Image (cartoon, grey):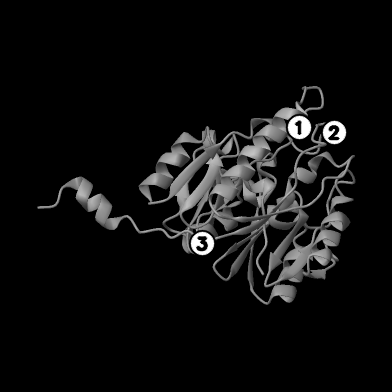
Amino acid sequence: MPTDVEEAVAVTPARTPVKRTVLMCKPEYFTVVYRINPWMDPALPTDTSLAVTQWQALYDVYIGLGYDVQLIDPIDGLPDMVYAANGGFVIDNIAYGASFTYPQRQPEGPAYMDWFRENGFDVRVPAEINEGEGDFLLVGDTILAGTGFRSDSNSHDELGTIFGREVVTLGLVNPSFYHLDTAIAKLDETNIAYLPSAFDEPSLAILRERYPDAIIATEEDAAILGLNSYSDGYNVVIASRAKDFERQLRERGYNPIGVDLSELLLGGGGVKCCTLELRR
């Protein structure tokens, strides 16, 4: 008779990493001088050199995993530019540009679109307000698209027209999880993890139907942006303090890798926020 351990091993799927190409921006000008999300408090001190050191550790993890890491030059006066995921959404060499909600971040949109053009992407200038891969996640052939705080739901129609893929609208209701990538983690092309309390009831019904085997994150892990993670299908880079999420990932056959981005959390960002996937 097989033991419980042998049975667990037998049902744990074999996960296969897929090499990723990502865009990052070094936080040379990171600070918190305005408040556009609940995480930000200009009264609290920030340490730019520590932010750079923590970001470098994330960069080094990606290099160690064999990723192709591209860099965009930071711009003085744009402290949130480190959150590269918000700079656009890229599939099949088409880069759908970002159009930010708050004036403090609006210059980032053109800066990222310039980088896309200079690096050979087919750039589509947005007509609608959206904050890139912060609110758009490609899972399989489906684009999960968040709305409620930053990206206008009209951008979802624009997405569908540009990319010719199914777009599933999900409503965010908790201001602390104002971007979709703070409330959902894509683990591979069929699996996700998410925080139920971040969504309205119609969106929860969609998630439960489409992803019945999803990992359900704890409030504690979500509160340190544990879901704001990045996966290659096997290796999942997460907040090092997200211990229950780490446990659940291991049980599902993934390899969680913890990093400390506590300084960048002061601006409301984590692993995924610093990572824009480039799909050629």
Q: Disc 3 or 1, which lies upstream in sequence?
A: 3
Res 236 visible = yes
Please tell me in which quadrant of the rendered image residue 77 appears.
top right
Name the kind of residue labelled 2 in the image: Tyr
Residue placed under numbered mark 3 in the picture: 18
Whether residues under marks 3 and 2 lie with C-beta atoms below 8 angstroms apart, the answer is no
**Tag 1 secondary structure:** loop
- Asked if 210 appears above or below 28 in the picture, the reply is below
Residue at point 41% right, 40% down?
Answer: 247
- Asked if 265 appears above or below 118 in the picture, the reply is above
Name the kind of residue labelled 3 in the image: Val
Sort mark 1 into few (<14), some (14-19) or many (20+) by Cα contacts within 10 Å. Answer: some
Whether residues under marks 1 and 2 lie with C-beta atoms below 8 angstroms apart, the answer is yes
Which residue is nearer to you in this view: 9 or 164?
9
Alpha carbons under labels 3 and 2: distance apart: 38 Å
Q: Disc 3 or 2, which lies upstream in sequence?
A: 3
Q: Residue 54 in the image: x percent, y percent?
A: 65, 34
**Tag 3 secondary structure:** loop
Q: Is residue 12 left or right of residue 73?
A: left
Residue at point 73% right, 46% down?
Answer: 83
**Tag 2 secondary structure:** loop
